[in-house]
Image: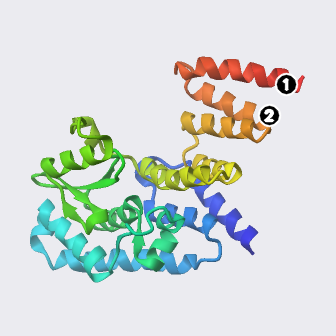
Amino acid sequence: MNATILAEARAALDAVGQLPDSEIEIGVAALQLARIDAPEANWQAGRGFLSSLAQQAMQAALANSAADAGDGEQRRLVLAGLVHHRLGFRGDSQSYDDLSNANLLHVIERRRGLPVALGLLWLHAADALGWEAYGIDFPGHFLLALRGDAGPVVIDVFDGGTRLEAREMRALVKRVEGEKAELKPGMLTAMTNRAVLLRLQNNIKLRRLRAGDMQAALTCTEDMLRFSPEHAGLWREAGLMNQRLERIGAAIAALERAVALAPADPASIRLRELIDELRNRLN
């Protein structure tokens, strides 16, 4: 049974990998990733929850004419009221490193999660409403932005959907990177749907690496490549992990793909040398 679930989920991720970024249903894609790590969980219940979330968001938006008209702050209040107050989702600061916090099925069940997992719920609801929202790859802490008539409203979904102004963002970056760090314009760049999903899975990959489970980290990386097959950095990581696991043929294939995708990258010079070294080991 689990083998069938894994095969279905991975086939779905392969299909996502062929889509333009704008056509990715980010919540549904995250559920497929969650199925792989939790094949025993009720995936259909998770999908039903996302449908219910979209419907409830529509009802809440219709009751707020200012939000419907384009007021970014009112849109924040609508989604914060729904996701955090009515449905009870919150950031898990007590067991932050628990892998369940990055699994959307478990997040839905537990009503707790990492910033990026909670952000997926906001992005799903905003998309259902036709509101422009995007993730922000802020240093050490995923943020989200809702665009309104007066510009984007930056939101900390881990903190109940609170609004962040420049002062709060500056304090946040100092807390993450040190007192000498300063807020820079590039820190607020909009993320693509794929980038948000990659950040979600990167939490799982890094925790597996810290636990010394190289095989599990490689499996996570390979699943990331299913929905982001043109990511040279991921191919490089997959190649190096395969090398560590003494899978030389697989390492060569992955590293060659990384070089082909980014031939001008300075790191490709070293990768070509490594590929030659690995080939010599096969002779």
Amino acid type, callout 1: Arg
* Label 2: how many Cα within 10 Å (few below 14, some 14–19, many 20+): some
Q: Quadrant of the C terminus?
A: top right
Looking at the rendering, which quadrant does residue 54 occupy?
bottom left
Residue on which the image places disc 2: 248
Indicate whether 132 appears above or below 277: below
* Residues at marks 1 and 2, CA–CA distance in whole angstroms: 8 Å
Residue at point 83%, 20% (across, down) = 280
Q: Are marks 1 and 2 in contact (CB under 8 Å)?
A: yes
Residue on which the image places disc 1: 281
Residue 219 in sight here: yes
Residue at point 43%, 54% (across, down) = 23
Residue at point 67%, 65% (across, down) = 8
Disc 2 secondary structure class:
helix
Indicate whether 220 appears above or below 269: below
Looking at the rendering, which quadrant does residue 250 occupy?
top right
Indicate whether 237 appears above or below 217: above
Q: Quadrant of the N terminus?
A: bottom right
Amino acid type, callout 2: Ile
Identify which residue, 210 or 144, lies in the foreground.
210
Residue 26 left/right relative to 9: left
